[in-house]
Image: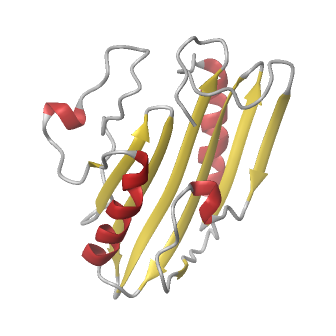
Amino acid sequence: MRLVATIFLCAILFALAPQPSFAQEHDKDSIGLTLGKNPSAKDIGLPVYPGSKPHHEESNDSAAKFGLWGGGSGFKLSVLKMDTPDAPDKVAAFYKKALAKYGKDLDCTNSQSQSDRRRTDDENSKALACDDDKPDANGMLFKAGTKNKQHIVSIAPNGKDTLYKLASVSIWDSDKKNHDAK
């Protein structure tokens, strides 16, 4: 339930804030909302680590997809939580390779350098940054893509298993002149 509340809060904030540009996904006359519980690896754009199982919590929020658009602008968020008995370092190596198809992966695990933690001053910049994103306790966090089309992997030990979270975030605004490629 916590994930659903977070998603709806994001939707409200999205409606109130100007959004950066992204490839137009819906025409200006459409409006819509999508909400689902089972995003696929295709929705996220990253493979599921071999031998993984869905992560189960009391809140039952191991996967969700959410999208909101209107007037040619919108966003889409897909999240998947999985468990594997393999070590976090092995999972990290797998996902660093998988993220490479979206460009150089950004390691936000221990990132303290200006280049990794920078906040982009140029509103039209497509550069991805760690900003204030941090991994879970004793975990790792990797990103790849652009500011408007991000693929995020969070990995952390979870008892004798490894918990990893895959996320894809897409933001678009057809009124802006600069669009990221899909």
Instruction: Name above or below for residue 127 compared with residue 167.
Output: above
Q: Quadrant of residue 90?
A: bottom left
The residue under the point 74% across, 21% down is: 72
x and y percent of residue 60 in the render?
64, 70
Can you see residue 1? no
x and y percent of residue 30 in the render?
86, 25
Q: Quadrant of residue 177?
A: top right
- Lateral position of residue 19 relative to residue 164, left or right: right
- Lateral position of residue 109 relative to residue 174, left or right: left
Instruction: Name above or below for residue 74 compared with residue 37.
Output: above
The residue under the point 56% across, 74% down is: 57
Instruction: Name above or below for residue 179 compared with residue 32.
Output: above
x and y percent of residue 87 in the render?
29, 82
x and y percent of residue 2 in the render?
60, 55
Image quarter hosting the N terminus: bottom right
Nearer to the camera, 104 or 151: 104
